[in-house]
């Protein structure tokens, strides 16, 4: 029905029917608008519901992760505890060896209940530095056959500490091959029982030295299967490791060499004569007194 017809129909109706008809039309418009708003609201709610479902799924996954986290942390803690126990056993074993050699160890570093020495007895003493130490009773800084003083483990240079370890402990303490070779090189210098010693006696301002070329051949003898090219690369790395682990007590010097009538520059790792190495000193003087002792633990 056209608008003109509706208008004419409305105009023909009595006033109260006309008002009623107009009110119904307005009501219909209002309801249609409200329905449209509700449709929009329903669409928004459906979208929110989808979002919440995804969020719920994510939270469930996180809850599952959190529920498994305590187990993971327990496993990590157990592994760390096992490693700490193993490390403590290694330290105790090393300290026991050093104490039996006559070393004096700082009291704060020693667990008297875990070290294993003869008769299980340790003596506590105070030194002039004001610190308390443990030692095997009556072992007052003895001299070894070479005239070197046996020091507390912590007083040694890192390279000396590594050199004192056996092969297994050294491998655990140092993953890098150049580091382990540096320790073995140092041990060859100070321990006559090693046998394969590439060090040479120096003169004037050099106490001892090892040539880079000799070091290369020594490395190949120590590590089977190493090529000459790789051994040549290891020479520089081993020298760097020695310098670092000795806290630069040693040095590298270059010297002109002659072979087959030709001159060439040869690197040398040298121990200067005026360098102080812990424990490598002459016998104590007559006025060096024995430190005061305290109680004996055991």
Image (cartoon, rainbow, N blue to C red):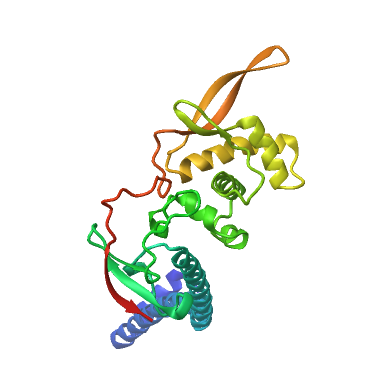
Q: Position of residue 224 (x, y in %)?
A: 75, 47
Residue 35 placement, left or right of 263 = left
Q: Residue at x 43, y 46 (%)?
A: 280
Count of picture labels = 0
> Residue 284 or 164: which is nearer the viewer?
284
Vertical order, 187 against 24 (above or below): above
Residue at 72 percent of width and 44 percent of height: 221
Residue 46 seen: no
Most distant residue in the top direction: 261
Percent x, y of residue 2: 48, 70
Residue 274 image point, x, y percent = 39, 34
Q: Is residue 2 above or below residue 78?
A: above
Asked if residue 152 can be seen in this view, the reply is yes
Left or right for 234, reference 131: right
Taking 107 as reference, is 211 left or right?
right
| Residue drawn at 53 percent across, 73 percent down | 86
Query: Where 225 sits versus 61, above or below?
Result: above
* 42, 279: nearer the viewer: 279
Residue in the image at 29% along x and 84% along y: 15
- Indicate the position of residue 188 as horizontal and vertical percent values: 59, 46
Q: Give the quadrant of residue 3.
A: bottom left
Quarter that holds the C terminus: bottom left
């Amino acid at each position: 029905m056209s608008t003109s017809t509706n208008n004419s129909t409305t105009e023909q109706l009595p006033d109260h029917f006309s008002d009623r008809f107009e009110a119904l039309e307005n009501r219909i418009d209002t309801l249609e608008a409200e329905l449209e708003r509700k449709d929009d609201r329903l669409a928004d709610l459906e979208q929110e519901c989808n979002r919440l479902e995804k969020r719920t799924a994510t939270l469930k996954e996180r809850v599952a992760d959190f529920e498994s986290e305590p187990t993971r942390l327990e496993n990590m803690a157990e592994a760390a505890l096992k490693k700490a126990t193993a490390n403590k056993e290694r330290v105790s074993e090393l300290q026991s060896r050093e104490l039996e050699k006559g070393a004096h160890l700082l009291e704060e570093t020693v667990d008297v209940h875990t070290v294993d020495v003869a008769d299980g007895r340790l003596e506590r003493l105070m030194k002039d530095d004001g610190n308390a130490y443990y030692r095997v009773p009556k072992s007052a800084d003895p001299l070894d056959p070479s005239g070197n003083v046996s020091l507390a483990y912590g007083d040694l240079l890192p390279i000396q500490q590594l050199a004192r370890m056996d092969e297994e402990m050294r491998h655990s303490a140092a993953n890098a091959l150049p580091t382990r070779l540096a320790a073995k090189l140092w041990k060859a210098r100070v321990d006559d029982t090693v046998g394969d010693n590439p060090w040479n006696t120096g003169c004037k301002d050099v106490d001892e030295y090892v040539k880079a070329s000799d070091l290369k051949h020594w490395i190949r003898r120590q590590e089977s299967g190493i090529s000459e090219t790789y051994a040549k690369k290891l020479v520089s790395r081993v020298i760097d490791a020695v310098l670092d682990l000795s806290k630069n007590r040693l040095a590298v010097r270059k010297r002109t060499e002659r072979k087959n009538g030709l001159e060439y520059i040869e690197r040398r790792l040298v121990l200067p004569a005026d360098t102080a190495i812990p424990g490598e000193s002459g016998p104590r003087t007559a006025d060096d007194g024995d430190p005061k002792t305290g109680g004996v633990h055991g």
